[in-house]
Image (tube, helix red, strand yellow):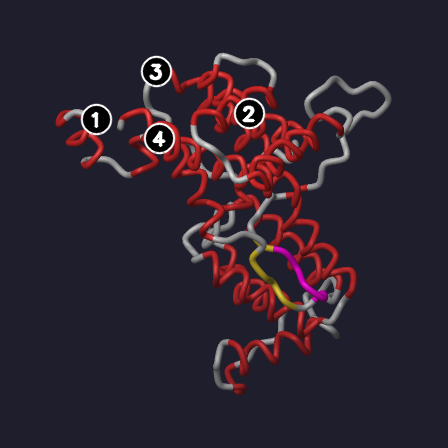
Amino acid sequence: MGDEEIQRRQALSLAQAVGFEPLPRQLKLDEIPQSAKAKLWFLVHSEILASSNTRGDIYDPISIAARNFWVSYAHRMIDEYRSSRQDVINAWKPYFAASTPWWRTLDFIQWMLRNLKSGDFAKGVEHILKSEMTAYRLYESTTIIPVATPEEGAAIFNALDGLTDPASQPIRAHLLQAAKELTGGNFAASARESISAVESYVSSATGKKDFSKAIYALDQKKPLHPAFKEAIIKLYGYTSNEEGVRHPLLTKETAPVTEAEAVFMIGACASFITYLQRTFDQASEV
């Protein structure tokens, strides 16, 4: 990397330097999309309407939750409490504003879950967190937990950081597409693009189109641990065996790939590409 390129990259964030579009939502900790906030507010607003009449009076369970909120959550004086439907809406809606930090929104939702103790409300929250592909899920109907780690997101950035030369663009394109498909909920497509990034790398490095032969060719250049070598071949085999992941669907509309599997695949494949870059690219420079 020349001095000019180093200076250019120092002036940019990592994401800007590699031209990387946003991480898959499932790996984007410390935020939730505004679309998720809007849907969560719709859910809460529906609960308020269901516990009120046409005159705007509220009833249980919202009336109990509203009083608890006023004193225990907002730490306001009880004699200042107002119990109309509109008062409750005015007090709760700000937690879902675009300017409100993500953690305030989720903290309020978690408080609501524990106060309402409603199975239907919990199901609604879980559906929204999943359908909006957030990095958070509901545990035992009362606790919101992250389902990703900073390391998983860093693995993708590390791989892309080494894929800036023109020859690496096909590899990088597969990895970027895997991220897009994961955000879009297309888990089989994401898994396919993730392993295709690895396939593209080993094929480019060895000139062999057959994946296992390419891995063994790399092994000849610099010996891989036998268990490690077999593990990546089996991972490739998983995508080949799952109908509709690497091959056209024959009898099913959707390949049986879960969100958790797709998240694992993009992280594992990105990490393996980084390993190959550090092992073989650096070795060729010696």
Closest to the camera, between mark 2 and mark 1, is: 2
Res 183 visible? no
Identify the residue position indicated by label 3 in the image. Answer: 166
| Residue 200 appears in the picture as rendered | yes
Query: Percent position (x, y) of residue 53?
Result: 75, 65
Q: CA distance from mark 1 to mark 3?
A: 13 Å
Mark positioned earlier in the residue sequence (1 or 3): 1
Q: Residues within 10 Å of mark 2 (few under 14, many from 20)?
A: some
Mark 2 and mark 4 lie on one chain; the one further toward the N terminus is 4
Assign a secondary structure to mark 1.
Answer: loop
User: Of the residues under marks 4 and 1, which one precedes in the sequence?
Assistant: 1
Mark 4 and 1 residues: CB-CB less than 8 Å, in contact?
no
* Residue 181 figure quarter: top right
In space, the residues marked 4 and 1 are separated at their CA atoms by 11 Å
Dot in front, 2 or 3? 2
The amino acid sitting under disc 1 is: Met
Q: Label 4 belongs to which residue?
A: 162
Residue 216: which disc?
Answer: 2
**Viewer-nearest of labels 2 and 4?**
2
Res. 237 image quadrant = top right
> Which secondary structure, mark 4?
loop
Mark 1: few/some/many CA within 10 Å (<14, 14-19, 20+): few
Question: Label 2 vs label 4: CA separation?
Answer: 23 Å
Q: Compare residues 15 and 237 and report the one nearer the observer.
A: 237
Q: Identify the element where label 3 is drawn.
A: helix
Residue 131, percent from left and from top: 66, 43
Outermost residue, left side: 3
